[in-house]
Amino acid sequence: MRILGIETSCDETGAAVIEGTTKVKPVKLLSNVLATSLAKHAETGGIIPEIAAREQVKYIIPVIREVLLQAKLNEDKPQIDAIAVTFGPGLIGSLLVGVETAKTLAYLWNIPLIPVNHLYGHIYANWIVANGSWEVEKKALSISYVSRATPRFPAIALVVSGGHTDLVLIKKHGELQVIGGTRDDAAGEAFDKIGRLLGLPYPAGPVIAKLAKNGDPKAFRFPRPMWDSGDYDFSFSGLKTAVLNLVRRNSWQFDEAAKTSSLSFKERESFINNNNKLLVDLCASVQQAIVDVLVSKTVQAVKEFKARSLLLGGGVAANKQLAKAFKNNSQLSILNSQFSVPPPNLCTDNAAMIAAAGFYNDQQVLWKEVTADPELYY
Ligand code: KG4
Ligand code: ZN
């Protein structure tokens, strides 16, 4: 079965084609294209919904054409069996662009439509073989610590994105149960808001991760909120406040970094690395605090639910320190749970994960019945 995936929940416009044979095996990625309006939002510290949607109107058709071309499919009547589209959660204007395009194409090509929850998509990125085979992929990624085998059930998934920090128990395809989530900011949101405090561009997660490489993760002992709360909930707003207090106490040092905001990102980064030890230490300590809480709660869940696989998903899953911390966790190796994290481009928003989720949860509906749902949860 060949599926065209379409993803437009936030600032990205993505299309991908996957091919799957059986649900006990991963799907093959035939082509994957992504256009983003991120550059337009970098300086404002967050996504401007109207701008994102207007850009998506421009990108959607060229992106779909390109993905069909790359998969060597005829654009007039491509040989695909279904279209999977993100119908929520997300920004309403953005979701509408993808949903209405998918409905129109499903009608014109007379093929079924599969509405996909974006959050399921992040989890199902773990079922995609992007480079021909798991072994080739493992080499291409050059990350030896990631398991490249078909996930096994029951599985625990940690979905860490800009809007979500969720722990999900998956008993079988389509049977998902949320066992915990954030009570305030999501992990990605914490990275982004702290980055904003420090004058870093949006999205700040990858920037903080990069700066953290040169910093000391033990330099500041930030709070690990709800570390031992005995449940699977998270809270990151206290961490943000702790950083804010520290920034206020040391404002003269951070002013130097802020003043450099007229420089290009590369220049700013090198300024920060060379001149502001405090900032790189802060980034490393923030990252460590977030990683510690995520790992401790997740490992606890793997233990309690005897999960045979642990799956990461969402933009924050692209964080290398997070993946390393899971891989080096001694409890996890005793539990013999297979650890999987998608390649970075399949952790952040993309359409391949939507097509994959569509393959394993193929609830086809009539095109007329699909509507965008910005508030959708699991
Ligand atoms: O999944 P995603 O692309 O979009 C949403 O569905 O929200 O996640 C975006 C989030 C942003 O908050 C971004 O700062 C964060 O993922 N992120 C990272 C990294 N790459 C992206 N956070 C930490 N380390 C990274 N390497
Ligand atoms: Zn996402």
Image: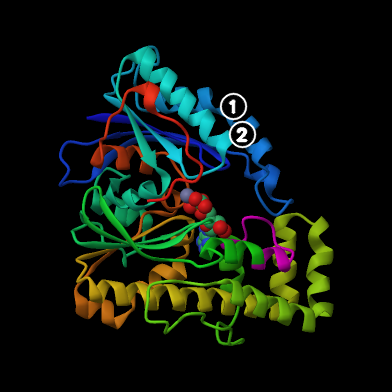
- Residues at marks 2 and 1, CA–CA distance in whole angstroms: 6 Å
Seen at 58% across and 80% down, the residue is 285
- Measured as percent of width and height from the top left, residue 4 is found at 35, 29
**Considering depth in this image, is 247 or 267 the residue closer to the camera?**
247
- The type of residue carrying mark 2 is Ala
The quadrant where residue 110 appears: top left
* Disc 1 secondary structure class: helix
What SS does tag 2 mark? helix
Label 2 CB sits under 8 Å from any ligand 1 atom: no
Q: Residues within 10 Å of mark 1 (few under 14, many from 20)?
A: some
Where is residue 215, by image quadrant?
Answer: bottom right
Q: Which mark is residue 53?
A: 2
**First to last magenta residue range:** 194-205
Q: Is residue 214 visible?
A: no
Residue 137 picture location, percent across and down = 31, 51
Q: Could you tell me how many numbered marks the image carries? A: 2
Which is more toward the observer, 73 or 88? 88
Mark 1 lies on residue: 57
